[in-house]
Amino acid sequence: MALTLQSACSLSPQVALRPEPFGALAYHYGNRRLVFLKHPDMVTVVKSLSDHPTIAATFDACGIADERRPSFLAALENLTKSEIIHVG
Amino acid sequence: MSAETLVSQLKRGLDAPICLTWELTYACNLQCVHCLSSSGQRDPRELSPAQAKAVIDELRDLQVFYINIGGGEPMIRRDFFDIIGHSIDNSIGVKFSTNGAYIDTDSARRLAAMDYLDIQISLDGTDAATNDAVRGVGSFDTAIAAMENLRRANFGEFKISVVVTRHNVDQLDDFKSLADSYGAQLRITRLRPAGRGADTWHELHPTSDQQIEIYRWLLAHGEKVLTGDSFFHLNALGEPLPGLNLCGAGRVVCLIDPLGDVYACPFVLHDEFRAGSVLEPGGFTKVWRESTLFTSLREPESAGACASCGSYDACQGGCMAAKFFTGLPLDGPDPECVSGHGEELLSARTSSDVASAPKPTSNHSRPVSLTRKPARA
Ligand code: SF4
Ligand code: SF4
């Protein structure tokens, strides 16, 4: 299922985030995957997902400009594949 | 951010390592001829249980997600279960490498009850003759018994870890079937001339034809097989292989040895690559973030003699440890350069060059060396 701006998402409870100069490293203790969050804004978004009903609302709250939203949405889609974030 | 910039970011180093190996002890029941840490005898100066726990506490504060535990044979340490338990309790996943000698029915059950734990059983042949020629008589049966015990205890997916040599390249398919038959994952790594491997590398490392075989095999099976940073020098052959495509020494990789000394990578146990000690003021964190050695390893490296090679982006000049212990310049081709430039340099060496190649600094080999049958001709 493709992610849309209206999807609700949250960070998996099995994931730890570690700040790094480029953004953060995300590690999933269950599937042992290590994922790079390659921008500090992406880190802010991922951390705030569960505070908002939709991805669009998260983007609003984090001040993600419209032109950046498609690439951020694609990045989030990838994070669902590695189970770093969940839909719902 | 594109992939290239991520690689350059990694080269500048991280706030904490991604791939940290901690060798708990130099003691080992075996004396493998290619042992990267020349293990055998326990070093009386090895970290005490309290010091070991303090290391874990520091790694927890640094948010190191997981550690690779090795040795020697790590299960020889009396506080082995305390160490891995303390680590896991502090959200540091553990993957440990073992020859399997201490995985009996009881310890297999105990291991199976733990979360965030991976086990890697070392095996260098799919038959006793091939394996035991390198790892010692009886070591094949020991490893298989450990795997059986893990299976009976329902441990789940463990890993079988193979150092690829001239004598087992033709067993790659068999290793894969063996792993599959245990529901295990196969990991294959490169033989580096480190530790006792510095003495045996010349006769054990794969031939250039075999390197091509390894490359092709990994192209076909690589997605399901773990390799770490073992084979990126083969990327010069064409399409890149899955795995880490850079030398992460001191950048994303490092080693803590049994005494608490911190080295740039597990394969460079030599004073020149010792960055400091976890026991010094500031501990591991200061060594990782501020040591002169690690800072210099994070500077852009020069391609040296590789600069004129069209494959440098793909192969990065190969492995620093392999160059260092074969006496080759660090800014030049890997001894196993697929274009043959390493071979040329090696064969141009005089006997005094060979004699003056750096020797691993620490040697914990047991004094009596066992006589081993040579592997198949
Ligand atoms: S020196 Fe070799 S083994 Fe060590 S991190 Fe670099 S490439 Fe890997
Ligand atoms: S010359 Fe250097 S960059 Fe080129 S293939 Fe050999 S090791 Fe790699």
Image (cartoon, coloured by chain):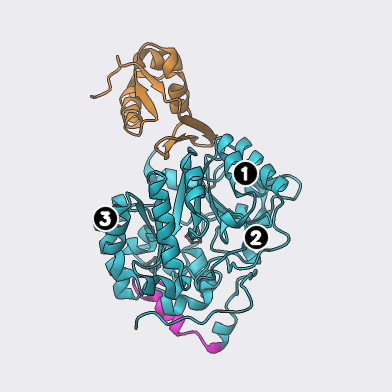
On screen, residue B288 versus residue B323, left or right, reads right
On screen, residue B279 versus residue B14, left or right, reads right
The residue that disc 2 covers is B274
Q: Earlier in the sequence, mark 2 or mark 3?
A: 3
On screen, residue B6 versus residue B58, left or right, reads left
Q: Quadrant of the C terminus of chain B?
A: bottom left
Chain letter, colour orange in render = A
**Identity of the residue drawn at 72% across and 51% down:** B48
Query: How many numbered tags mark residues here?
Result: 3
Chain letter, colour cyan in render = B
> In the image, which disc is placed on residue B221?
3
Alpha carbon separation for disc pair 1 and 2: 27 Å
Q: Amino acid at mark 1?
A: Asp
The range drawn in magenta is: B336-351
Quarter, ligand 2: bottom left
Q: Is residue B115 visible?
A: yes
Q: Secondary structure at mark 1?
A: helix
**Identity of the residue drawn at 38% across and 71% down:** B128
Between A32 and B41, the one lying in front of the other is: B41
For this orientation, the residue located farthest to the front is B105
Residue A38, how many percent across, how many down?
43, 35
On screen, residue B183 versus residue B295, left or right, reads left
Q: Are marks 2 and 3 on the same chain?
A: yes
Q: Nearer the viewer, mark 2 or mark 3?
A: 3
Q: Is residue B346 magenta?
A: yes
Residue B201, how many percent across, how many down?
46, 75
Tell which subunit mark 1 falls on.
Answer: B
Alpha carbon separation for disc pair 1 and 3: 37 Å
